[in-house]
Amino acid sequence: MKSKNDSFIIRSLSLKLPDLPIFFFIYIFIGILTIPNNFLLDDLDVCWLTRTGELIWQNGQLPTADVFSFTHQGKPWVLYQWGFEFFLGGLHLLAGLGGVVWGGALLIALTYSLLFHFLLKLGIHRVVCIGLVVITMLINSFHWLCRPNTASILFYTYLIIFLENHRRSPKNHTIWALPLLFLLWANVHLGFTSGLMVLLVYALGAWFFPTFFREEQQVKDCRLMLVFFLCLIATFINPYGPYLFKYLWELSQATNMNRGISELHSPDFHSPFFLLFALQICLVLLISHKTYSGRGLLLVVLCLTLIMALFSARHIPYFSIPAIIHLAYSWKARSGIENKPINLLNQHNGWGWGLTIATICLAGVTLAHRSNLEFYDFSEKRAPKAATAFLEKNLGESSPARIFTSGGGAQWNDYLLYKLFPRVKLFIDTRFDMYGDEFFKKFIILRQKLRCSLQPLEPWRIDFLIIEKNQGKDKNDPTDLVGWPPATFPWKLIYEDDQAMIYRNLKNATMLPKTEPNIKYGFQ
């Protein structure tokens, strides 16, 4: 027979043991963090995001006007995702790119461990839970980047879980804390609008269709509708107030810009990620005939988010999260375990383990950064690292050099900004919303003209032109030089490698010290 002291010791030890979701969190977090050429840095938008965040930290306020370009110097700049830039910039100041990767890994691991925890609480077998979450992870992995949308997906997942817990537990009064979530979300990413849409669907269901919302409920519940209006008001608490909504609407109408951003296009089902998305749609259609409490409500959410996902690949995660919850409920209905007790003993224990592991990892990447032992870097396939190093070594310290870059879309400019700011000013970078739709169109036209002549650059007084070497070139014909602009006066080829070419404007001869040109193929 166990004594009271023995029982107390056993309970104390059990509180120290992490549950399965915590192990899942640690596994994802460390798994992402230990990848050297980390895919979280594949999108070079992270370059200007971190530099903007550093400016906020250093100046103690948001930049009110553009400081990165020479074409829009001083133009008002709306930082609608300043919260994430602040987060990323602080981590970069602390631990360099290691801190940036740490932040991205933390957001991703939290998202799917929270989802895993919720599915386990439903009473579904852990193997099925792992399978459902892994499917969701694979579908959304194309969005695993150090970008604000990664934080938005975490907030969205938490919101869906929060609303489902409220629907299943009507005496839960924590719904009044939701405005705090939207207050933070509205300052991190524009995805909060999707959250407002889902919250409105739940609020309408609870008020006008009580049995549709919760089968055993016969009385209308207006609390969620009141919470919705409080959340809407909370989103106005941002540096721009209600104008933020007007600005987001203007972004949605920027046709030239949106046409040039691949993630805003409809999903291309030739990609394996999008094939998994199609598989999830098929599973939803196959299993949807099984009824469960709140089924109609989730199906409305799925229909709305599916339309969004088919219109723009960026919104696929906003469909996949509620879709996997719908599949979990349907699995329970098919298996006849609707009333099975929750098979998670210590639901709230073990998060201290995750916090401890995350803190130790942050200390590790910080120490490595301070010791100049950089483990993370941008991919050489995506960034012109050698050409940028050449400029970094040879640029003078006088006024900032004006640079036009035609490679990598506009993301090469982001990398130059990351490495060389404030010694350079750019023609454009991937803050397309700041530049405006008409200027983005001019940039596309100008880049096309440069394949024939460099003359169109004359009015802009460019100091250096960086060209992606194989842009427009027929790789099957080595004699085809389409896309290689002629080096006629005042332009001189000063650098060339397998990836990029740098042209110097001789009219601005003071911008670069006299050094031997680094030209691999002997062009003069």
Image: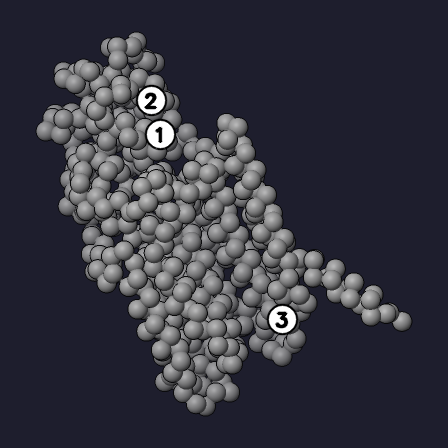
Measured Cα–Cα span from mark 1 to mark 2: 8 Å
Q: Is residue 346 left or right of residue 386?
A: right
Q: Would you name the residue on which mark 1 appears? A: 419
Mark 1 or 3: in front is 1
Q: Which mark is residue 123?
A: 3
Q: Are marks 1 and 2 in contact (CB under 8 Å)?
A: yes
Measured Cα–Cα span from mark 1 to mark 3: 51 Å
The amino acid sitting under disc 2 is Glu
Q: Residue at x 46, y 38 (%)?
A: 94
Image quadrant occupied by the C terminus: top left
| Element assignment for label 3 | loop
Query: Does residue 92 show up?
Result: yes
The amino acid sitting under disc 1 is Lys
Q: Residue at x 10, y 29 (%)?
A: 459
Q: Which mark is residue 392?
A: 2
Residue 84 position within the rendered picture, expressed as x and y whole percent measured from the top left: 38, 50
| Element assignment for label 2 | helix
Q: Is residue 315 left or right of residue 446?
A: right
